[in-house]
Image: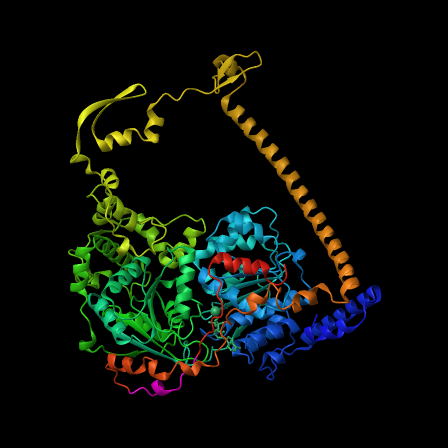
Amino acid sequence: MAPEGKSKKRARPAKSGESRTLKRKEQQESLAKLQKAVDELDPKSADIHNFTDLPLSAATAAGLRASHFESLTDIQARAIPLALKGKDILGAAKTGSGKTLAFLVPVLECLFRQQWTEYDGLGALIISPTRELAVQIFEVLRQIGRKHVFSAGLVIGGKSLKEEAERLGRMNILVCTPGRMLQHLDQTAGFVVDNLQMLVLDEADRIMDMGFKSAVDALVEHLPKSRQTMLFSATQSKKVSDLARLSLKDPKYVSVHEAAETATPSTLQQHYIVTPLPEKLDTLFGFIKSNLKSKIIVFLSSGKQVRFVYEGFRHMQPGIPLLHLHGRQKQIARLGITESFTKAKHACLFATDVVARGVDFPAVDWVIQADCPEDADTYIHRVGRTARYQSVGKAVLFLDPSEEPGMLKRLEQKKIPIQKVHVKETKKKSVADQLQNMCFQYPELKYLGQKAFISYTRSIHLQKDKEVFQLKKLDLDGFATSMGLAGTPNIKFQKGEDVKRIKNRSRAELSSGSEDEFDDEGHKKKKDEVRTKYQKMAERVNQDVLSSHYRKIIDDGDADEDADFLSVKRVLGEDELDEAGKAGEAALEAKKIQLGKQEFIVDSHRREKLLKSKKKLLKYMDKGQKLVFDDDGNAHAIYELQDEDEFKAQGPVDELRRQFVEQEASKVKEVDLEDKQLAKEKRKEKRAKRKEREREEELERQGMRGEKGPVAQLAGGEAEEDPLALLRSLPIAGGRDDDSEEDSEDERPKKKAKKWFQDDSDDEREKAKKAKKEIVMDREPETLEDLESLAAGLLGN
Ligand code: ADP
Ligand code: MG
C-alpha cells in the first residue's frame, strides 16, 4: 500500500498465489504496525510538532506533504492524537487555527486502518452549517486525501435530490449540510448509514443551536450509536444537553486557547467606530474609497441590505471591484462569487452571515461589520475571516450610539480587545444625494431600498439582546433619508402572540444565511411577518406599465436575486406593452365572444387575448366527460353514487371508514416489510458478488502485471490516465505560494487605513511583517457538477 513499496514489488516476477499471500501478509503487517504505533502514542506527549511525528498512513502523510502541510498547529497537535485513538472530541480553538485538518486527518486514518472499501458504504459524515463551508472542507479533504482510495462527496443541495441520491450509495465520506442530508436519509432508498464510523460537526455550536435543532436531531436518529463523534468550533459550547443529543461517550475537551488573553487571534487588530445609523452608509462608502487597494468583507444583517448597498454603491463606482453574497442566490452564483473573492487581490464583498463562519478566504485585509452582530460569538466568527493562520488582519465594527455601551459590554465579557477610533470628517462621503437620485431614476432601487429598510428594522426588532438593540433609540427617518428614500416606510409590527413567536424564532431563521439553508433544503420558507404599506403597494398589480417587470425583479420570493437588476432595463416590445396593460388606451370596438356556453363582451385586445388563452379556454369550453365501460359494454361515469339504502345497510359510516383505513394500512405495511427485506437481500447479494468479482480481478491482475494490488494501483496511478491527476493539480487549501513576495507591501492598505482613522495610538503592529498567503489557482472546478464529478472520480471509483 505504501507507495515506496511498490517499485520493489513490481520488479519481482509474478507468482500469483504465493506472491499474493506475501503481499497480503505485508499489508497486514504494516497495518498492524500502524495500529500498534497508534496504541502506543501518548496524546499528551510534548514531542509532537510535525505531521511526521504522528503515526499516519503513508497515503495521508503523502497527501499532507503534497499540500505543503508540515508542522502542526496547536489544536492539531492536541486533538489528532486523541482522535486517532478513537476518542470523542470537543475541540475549541480560535478562528483560523487549523481545526479542519484536526478532524480530516483522523477521518482518513480511521477509515484507512479499517481498510474501508466502497462496499462498506458510508464511513464518515462531516456536517457543516453552510454550503460554502461544506465546499471548502471538501476541497481540503480532496487535497490531503488524494492518495487514498476512498470516495467522497458533497451533499449540500442545489441540484435535484435524485441526481444527488444516485451518487450517495457509493460514497465513503460525505460532507453535508444538515437539512439536505436529512432529506436523503428520509427519502433515498438504499442509502444505508448503518456502518458509519465517524461523525464530525464543524462549527458545532452553530449546528447544535436552535436553527438546526430539529434537522440535526432527526439526522442523528438515523445514525448508529457506536461511532466516534467530534465537535469543533471557535466558540465551543460544552452544554451537557448537546452532548446528550449526540450521545457522546466520555468526550475529551480539547481547548487550546482557553487560557489565552483574548478570544480572537493575536494578529488581529480590532476597532470600532460610533456612527449614527443615518451616517452609516456615508461612513462605509468613505471607508471603501479610502481602502481601494485591499480585500474587504462587509457584513450586513440581511440579504436585502446586502443587495441594496451593493447595487447602490456599484453605481457610484468607488473604484474597487464589488461583490455580494447572500443566501438567496443560486448555488452556482454563490460558488462563483466565493471563487472570485478568493482569487481577487483587491475587492469588497458585501455579505450576510452566510460566510461568517469557517470560510477561509485568503488574505482578507479588513472585516467591516456595518451592521452590529447579534452577539459576541457572531462577532468572533465574522472577524475571524481575517488574520487567519499566522497572517494579520484588521476589523472594524460600526455601532450606533445606542448600541455602543451594550455591545462593548458583551465584547468585554468574551475577552475581545477592541479600540475606539474616529472617522475623519473629510473621509466621510455623503451618499444620500446620489442614492436619492438613483432611487428616482431606477424605481427598482427604491423598492429594494424600502425592503432593505424594512428588513433592517425588523432584524433590530427581533434581536434577542435588548440591551444592545433598541429600535426606539434609532433615528429611522434619518436612516431612510440616508438611503435615498423619499419617506420613511411605515412599519407595523404584528401584535400579540405573533410577535412572541417571531421573537422566539431561532437565530438561524433570522439570519438570511440560514434562512436560505432552510429554503434550499426543502424546509418551509419564512413568511414576512411584518408587512408595510410599501410591501402591499409593491405587491399590487398594475401600478404602471412596468409593474409586472418590477415585480419580477424585486419580488420577495425571487429565488435568484443575484442578477444585476439595474441593468435589466429594456425597452418593451409592442406585444409586451399590450400584455402589460395598455388595455385602456388601445380600446377596441366592443364585440362579443362565445366561449363554451358563455358569452363575453370584449372591449380590448388584452381582454380578447386573455380570453383566448389556453387556460381560459379550458375553463369555459365543453371539455367532455370521461367514461368507463362495464363488462356488458354499458358506459358509466367514473364515479357513481352507490344506492343510499344499500350503502347504509353495510353498517355505520365511521366503522366502515375505520375498517377501510385499517385494511389499507396493513396492506401497505406488508408490502413495505417485503420491500425492505427484498432490498436488504439484494444489497447483501450485490455486495457479495462485488467482493467476489474484486477478488477475481485482483487475481487476474496479479497474474498479468505482477503483484500490484488494487489499492496500490489506484493510489499510485499512471500519471496521465489517473483520475486523480486533475485533483492533484487543484489549489492547495492553505498552501502558500513561494513567489508571494511579488505581492508587494506597498499595495497593502496600511497607510490608507491610517489616514482614514484618527487613531490616537500609534500602532506598532502596523509595521509588523505580513505573513503573506497566496493561493495558486492552477485549475478550479467551475461548477458544482464539476466538483461532484471530481468527487465521484475521487480516489479510484
Ligand atoms: P479554522 O477551522 O480553525 O478556522 P482552518 O482549518 O480553516 O482554520 O485553517 C485556517 C488556515 O490555516 C487554512 O488556510 C489552512 O490551510 C491553514 N492551515 C491549517 N493547518 C495548517 C498547518 N498545519 N500548516 C500550515 N497551514 C495550516
Ligand atoms: Mg473551520
The quarter of the rendered structure image containing the C terminus is bottom right
- Would you identify the image quadrant in which residue 715 lies? bottom right
Q: What is the x, y in percent for residue 742?
A: 41, 82
Residue 508 part of the magenta-drawn span: no
Quarter of the view holding residue 740: bottom left
Report how many numbered discs are placed on residues in the image: 0
Viewer-closest of 654 and 179: 179
* Magenta stretch holds residue 768: yes
Residue 586 appearing in the image = yes
Quadrant (top left, top right, bottom left, bottom right) of the N terminus: bottom right
For the point 50% across and 22% down, the residue is 653
Q: Is residue 234 left or right of residue 552?
A: right
Judging from the image, the colouring scheme is rainbow
Can I make out residue 297 in this image? no
Q: Residue at x 52, y 54 (%)?
A: 181
Q: Is residue 700 left or right of residue 163?
A: right
In this view, the residue in front, 758 or 498, is 758
Dominant secondary-structure state across the stretch colored magenta: loop
**In the picture shown, does residue 267 fall above or below 249?**
below
**In the image shown, does 163 or 580 lie closer to the viewer?**
580
The picture places residue 454, in percent across and down from the top left corner, at: 25, 55
Residue 411 position within the rendered picture, expressed as x and y whole percent measured from the top left: 35, 73
Magenta residues span 762-772
The image position of residue 261, as x and y in percent, is: 42, 81
Instruction: Indicate the quadrant where residue 761 lies.
Output: bottom left
Q: Is residue 12 above or below residue 657?
A: below
- Give whichever of 634, 239 is nearer the camera: 634
